[in-house]
Image: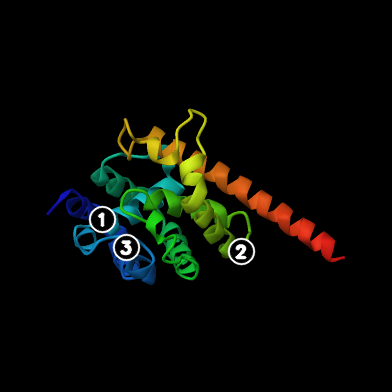
Amino acid sequence: MNTDQKAFTYIVRFAGQIREMIDSRFFLECSDYSEPDKLKGTVERVIIETVMCTNHFDKWKKQPKELCKYLNSNATEEEFKRFADNLHRLERIVTSEIKGVFNKKDSFIFLTLFERFTRLGREDKAFADFLRAFQSSFRYTRVNGEGLLFDEIDKKKSTKDKPVIYAKLNLLERLMLEFLNREKDTHTLADEKAF
């Protein structure tokens, strides 16, 4: 057993729900995991990281075993149910051109971002539109407060360090809100011109 597989043995309360999610269309068709990744516990780790990042980021642990132990004691059925619902929503909008962001390194960040997006009350299609803009432009042109592109944020640190995750999420959320507001303003102007 590798580290991710061993860690999974510490989250027995939610193991059944996690196993069901692994077989969802999202992880089978709408993400960018290799077959070996799926067999080595990567998908389980991504689910665990997402639930932790979405609901308990203040208690973030870098090691998979510690994440599993924490969630086993502190997570709720509702948190996992909401995450499963989000996966089903994403299945309807993720296309081949944007599924690459849902990879073993960054999936949990984009899945956490989608949870934040759901609180805005916008149609899910707008999130897919944002991901397209991110993939084609923002990823290579927009920087955070320290002048780093998204893919540069973790160059000198572990991708699982709390400050790295925080910086990536903040950059993505800022870009998403700018994009959605600009898109909303464009639609408003078009609507006004129709009258």
Q: Position of residue 190 (x, y in %)?
A: 77, 60
**Which type of secondary structure does the marked residue at label 1 adopt?**
helix
Q: Amino acid at mark 1?
A: Thr
Q: Position of residue 62 (x, y in %)?
A: 30, 39
Q: Which residue is mark 1?
A: 42
Q: Please tell me whether mark 3 or mark 2 is closer to you in this view.
A: 2
Q: Amino acid at mark 2?
A: Glu
Q: Please tell me whether mark 1 or mark 3 is closer to you in this view.
A: 1
Q: Is residue 129 left or right of residue 78?
A: right
Q: Position of residue 176 (x, y in %)?
A: 57, 48
Q: Is residue 67 above or below residue 33?
A: above
Q: Is residue 81 above or below residue 8?
A: below
Q: Which residue is mark 3?
A: 18
**Which type of secondary structure does the marked residue at label 3 adopt?**
helix
Find the residue positioned furthest to the right. 195
Compute the Cα span from label 1 to label 3: 12 Å
Among the 4 quarters of the image, the one containing residue 173: top right
Name the residue at 47% across, 63% down. Answer: 86
Please count the marks in the image: 3
Q: Amino acid at mark 3?
A: Ile
Q: Is residue 195 above or below residue 60?
A: below
Instruction: Please tell me which residue lies in front, 81 or 191.
Output: 191
Precedes in sequence: disc 1 or disc 3: 3
Compute the Cα span from label 3 to label 2: 26 Å
Find the residue positioned furthest to the top. 146
Which disc is residue 123 wearing?
2
Compute the Cα span from label 1 to label 2: 30 Å
Q: Residues within 10 Å of mark 1 (few under 14, many from 20)?
A: many
Instruction: Please tell me which residue lies in front, 50 or 25.
Output: 25
Q: Position of residue 162 (x, y in %)?
A: 38, 35
